[in-house]
Amino acid sequence: MSLINRFSSFDLECGTDEAGRGCLAGPVTAAAVILPLSFKNKILNDSKQLSEKKRNFLKPILENEAFSFAVKHISETEIDKINILNASIKAMHESINLLKTTPQFIIVDGNRFKPYKTIPHQTIIKGDSKYLSIAAASILAKTYRDAYMEIIHEEFPMYNWKQNKGYPTKEHRAAIKKYGPTKYHRKSFRLLPEQHLLDL
């Protein structure tokens, strides 16, 4: 199924999505993208459906061809303060804020969002596999966040963030159990399953 360019009748429609919501470490990252009406791409899809190679191939294409795009990280410290849902929405709002042009309409992946200024919006479940601009936002959010995780991996290589990107893999949890959490870990998240927390 090919993705659709617009949900609304507005030319300046912005798609937004986040990456890293379920991670134990690192920021949650959102992107906002306004694509031209003429934009077409046969590869572009939800970032989770594409290989890392395809995401990295699409990133410069989207950056060059987008009418406007922006990406914003919200830190693990902020996530712990305001919770992951609020941090995800804040990341989306701030990425929209950074666009060089104010959108006339916003389409959002998922079913949770808070109004941004007075701009009308629509939440769309699985929007990243239906609309080009949300798919583009999902690719940029994911590639920018992955690049950030590869940088902080150098500081704490024992957690292998360059591979797991902060997600709760067995290897990541084993490293937390062995070395404890770092400054990049989200302290409000359950970093280890219950049985590891019990002093047996």
Image (cartoon, grey):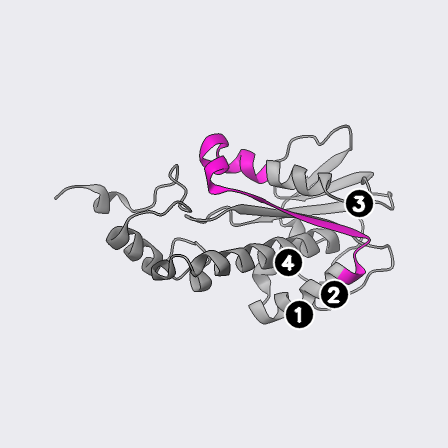
* Mark toward the viewer: 2 or 4: 2
Q: Determine which residue is flagged by label 4.
A: 139
Give the distance between the C-alpha atoms of the residues marked 2 and 4, in whole angstroms: 11 Å
Question: Which mark sits nearer the N-terminus, 4 or 3?
Answer: 3
Marks 1 and 2 in Cβ contact (< 8 Å): yes
18 sits left or right of 193 in the view:
right
Q: In the image, 61: left or right of 29?
A: right
Q: Say what secondary structure mark 1 lies in.
A: helix
Q: Nearer the viewer, residue 37 or 110?
A: 37
Q: Residue at x 46, y 56 (%)?
A: 152
Q: Is residue 129 above or below residue 107?
A: below
Q: Position of residue 34 (x, y in %)?
A: 78, 50
Instruction: Report if the CB atoms under discs 1 and 4 are less than 8 Å apart.
Output: no
Instruction: Tell me the residue that label 2 is attached to.
Output: 61
Residue occupied by mark 1: 57
Q: Amino acid at mark 1?
A: Phe
Instruction: Give SS at disc 3.
Output: loop
Which amino acid does the dot numbered 4 rest on?
Answer: Ile
From mark 3 to mark 1, how far is it between C-alphas?
24 Å
Can you say which quadrant of the picture contains the C terminus?
top left
Q: Which residues are magenta?
A: 64-89
Which residue is identified by label 3? 100
Q: Position of residue 146 (x, y in %)?
A: 53, 58
